[in-house]
Amino acid sequence: MAIRTVTLPDGTAVPALGQGTWRMGEERARREAEVAALRLGLDLGMTLIDTAEMYGEGGAEEVVGAAIDGRRKEAFVVSKAYPHNAGRADLKAACARSLSRLGLERLDLYLLHWRGSVPLAETVAGFRDLQEAGKIARWGVSNFDRDDMEELWALDGGAGCATDQVLYNATERGPEYDLLPALQRRGVPLMAYSPIGQGDLPTRDLTDIAAKHGASPYRVALAFVLSREGVVAIPKAANEAHLRDNRAAADLALDADDRAALDRAFPPPRSRRPLSMI
C-alpha cells in the first residue's frame, strides 16, 4: 500500500511519512549505516527527507547528500537555516553551504529553524530571493506557534509559507488546540518532528492497542500522528527494524475505540499551551 500524501499549498503532494536526520552525521563511524538507512527509507516510499545545517554542524546534510546520490528524482529534500543566518545576505550564504553539502542545485523546501532576532520580513525577503534565483522551490518555518504564524501571514509575501515544523506527538498535543486548526484552514501542513518522542514515550499506555493490532507501541504512536489531517511525520530511524516499523505505521488504521483510548491516556489540550521544542 502506498503511503498517503499531504498536499503543500502549491499543490505538490508529499508523503505523510518521511524521514528525519537529527543526530545523524555526528560520528564518521556511523555514516555508512546512516546512509544505508536513508536509502532503505527511500525504497520503502519515505521519500521526504528532513535535515538542517545544525544537525552535526552540516554532517547530516552530507549524509543525506550521499544517500540521495543517483536518486535525486526520488527525494524531496528539506533543510533548515539557523536563526543567526536568517538575514537576507546570510540566508543566501547559508543556503549555498547547505546545497554544497547536499550536492544539490536546488532545495525542495527550506525552513527557518526557529525565530531569532532577525526581523521576519527580512527573512521572508531572503527566502523570496532564493526562490527567484532558483536555489529553493519553497520555504517555510519551524517552531512557530499560532501568534508567530499570524504575524508571518500578515507580512508581504508571508502567505507563501509552505509548512510549519513543530514538536508533535501523543504526549505533546498542544498544537491541536489552535496552531493545527489555523494551519489546516490555510492549507498549510504541519510537519511533526519527534512524532514518537526521543525514547521517552510511555509505551505502557499503548500496550493494549498495540496488542490488538499486532504492532509495537511505537507504531501505534506514529499511526496516531499520521491519522491527523494535514500532518507530515518525520521520525528518525537508523536501523532496518526501526525503519520498517515506522513504514508499517502508515498502514495501521486506528478505529474509534483506539482513538478514545489514546485520548484517555494522553488527553487533548483543553486550553492553549506554549509550544514545546527540543
Image (cartoon, rainbow, N blue to C red):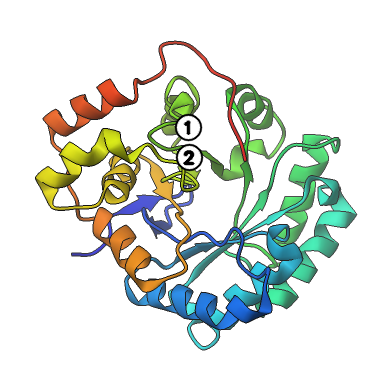
Residue 41 visible to an observer of this rendering: yes
Residue furthest front as drawn: 204
Amino acid type, label 1:
Leu
Q: Name the residue under label 2.
A: 188
Residues at marks 2 and 1, CA–CA distance in whole angstroms: 5 Å
Which of the marked residues, 2 or 1, is nearer the chain's N terminus? 1
| The C terminus - image quarter | top right
SS assignment at label 2: loop
Which image quadrant for residue 247? bottom left
Q: Quadrant of residue 259?
A: top left
User: To which quarter of the image does residue 40 belong?
Assistant: bottom left
Confirm whether residue 254 shows in the render. Answer: no
Identity, as a three-letter code, of the amino acid under mark 2 = Val
Check residue 44 in the rendering and tell me which mark sits there, or answer none. none
Q: Going by the picture, which residue comes out furthest to the top?
A: 271
Residue denoted by label 1 = 183
Q: In which quarter of the image is the N terminus?
A: bottom left
Total residue callouts: 2
Instruction: Please report the residue visible at 28 percent of the width from the left and 60 percent of the height from the top.
Output: 3
Report the residue at 34% width, 20% height from top: 267
Query: Can you give x and y, in whole percent of width and height, for residue 31 in the image?
Result: 60, 79
* Residue located at (26% from left, 29% from top): 262
Against 210, is 153 above or below? above
* Farthest right residue in view: 89
Q: Is residue 38 above or below residue 223?
A: below
Crowd rating for badge 2 (residues with CA inside 10 Å; few <14, some 14–19, many 20+)? many
Callout 1 crowding tier (Cα within 10 Å): few <14, some 14–19, many ≥20: many
Q: Where is residue 248 in the image (x, y as percent from the top left)?
A: 24, 60
Residue 19 shown left or right of residue 226 in the figure? right
Q: Mark 2 near mark 1, Cβ–Cβ under 8 Å?
A: yes
